[in-house]
Amino acid sequence: MPFIGNQPALSYTSFAKQDFTTSATTSYVLSQPVANANEIALFINFVRQEPTTAYTASGTSLTLTSATSASDDMYAIFLGKALQTVNPPAGSVGASQITDGSITSAKLAGSIGLDKLSATGTKDATTFLRGDNTFQAVSSDYVLLATTSASNVATLDLNGYFSGTYQNYKLIVEGFYGTTNVNNFKLRFATGSYTVQTSSYGDISGWGGVSPEQSGTTSSGSSGGSGSGIFIGHNSSDANYRNNTEITIFNPLSSYYKHITALTQYWNGSGTLRTANTSGTWLNSTAVTGIRLYFESGNLYANSIKLYGIK
C-alpha cells in the first residue's frame, strides 16, 4: 500500500552482535541495554540458551545461571536492538542488486581500483575503465621510470634509475636532432655517483633505407673496445628531419660486459631516410648507474626521452 508522510530515512536493518571474553563467572556487561532476557539470543559454545532459565538480563547486566569457563565461546544477538542505517551494510550489495547500465562514468571517481573489478568488468585483458570514461592499461611489461626532453643541450643524462627491480631496460628517444650536420649520435655509460666512461667501447651497425647512399655493415672500435661511445645513428641539423630510436639496455648492474642494441630511424645530411641496427658493448664489468646521450659535436634536441624498466 502507498506510504503516507515522509519517507523513513532508516531503511536497512541488521542485528547487533556482542562477543564476550569468558571467565569463571556468572556476571557480564552488555554493550546495549535491554528490557529483559527475551531481547537477546545468547549462545554458549554455539548452543542457544533459554531466556530466563539459563540467563536473565536487565539494562546492561547479564546474569548466567551457571558460571562459564575461560575456554567457553559466548556471544549474544540483540533481537530488540536492530541497527538501522541509511546505506546498506558494508559488503551487502552484489552485482545482482545493481541494474545493468545504471552506473555512469560521472559516478566513478578517478579510476576503478583493480581489486574492485571482476574479469568481466574490464574492457579486455589489458585495460580497465577510468573515471573519465577512458581505458587505462591494467598491466604492462614496461614500467615508466623517467621522462624528459632536450632543448639545445650538450649532453642528456639519466642517472639513478637502474636497480635490482628490473634486469633490462628500454630507452625511447623521439624526435631528436642536433645543431651540427651529419654528426654521430652516441651513448655512454656512467658508474658510481655519476662518472661517465669515455673509453673501452665497441659497436657494430648495419644500415639501409629509402634510396640509401650506403648499405651493409660497418664497425667502430676494435674487439679490444677502444671506441669513445656506442654509435646509435647519424643526424641532420634540420629540425624538420627529426629522428627516433629505441634502445634496449641489458642488465646494467651485472658483473660482466655491458651490452645494448638499438634500432634507429634517422635522416642524413642530404635528407635521405635510413634505418640503423646497432649493437654495442662497454668492455667493463663494473655496475652501470646511468647513461649519457650526446652528439660528437654540437648540441642535442629531443621531443621526448623515456626510460622504462622491463618486467
Image (tube, rainbow, N blue to C red):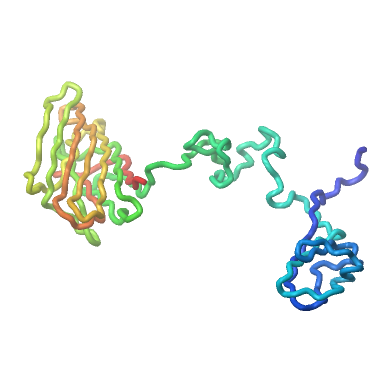
Q: Nearer the viewer, residue 124 or 150?
A: 124
Of residues 152 and 254, the one drawn nearer to the viewer in this rendering: 254
Q: Is residue 221 above or below residue 266?
A: below
From the viewer's perspective, tell me whether residue 170 is left or right of residue 208: right
Residue 245 percent coordinates (x, y): 26, 37
Q: Which quadrant holds the N terminus?
A: top right
Percent across and percent down for residue 300 are 23, 43
Farthest residue, direction bottom: 24
Camera-nearest residue between 276 and 152: 276
Name which residue lies at 25% across and 46% down.
250
- Residue 34, how many percent across, how many down? 88, 66
Q: Residue at x 15, y 54 (%)?
A: 284
Indicate whether 40 appears above or below 23. Answer: above
User: Could you tell whether 147 is left or right of 278 in the image?
Assistant: right
Residue 64 % position (x, y): 85, 73
Residue found 11% across the figure and 48% down from its top: 228
Q: Is residue 274 above or below residue 57?
A: above
Question: Residue at horizontal 70%, vertical 38%?
Answer: 96
Residue furthest toward the top? 211
Q: Is residue 63 visible?
A: no
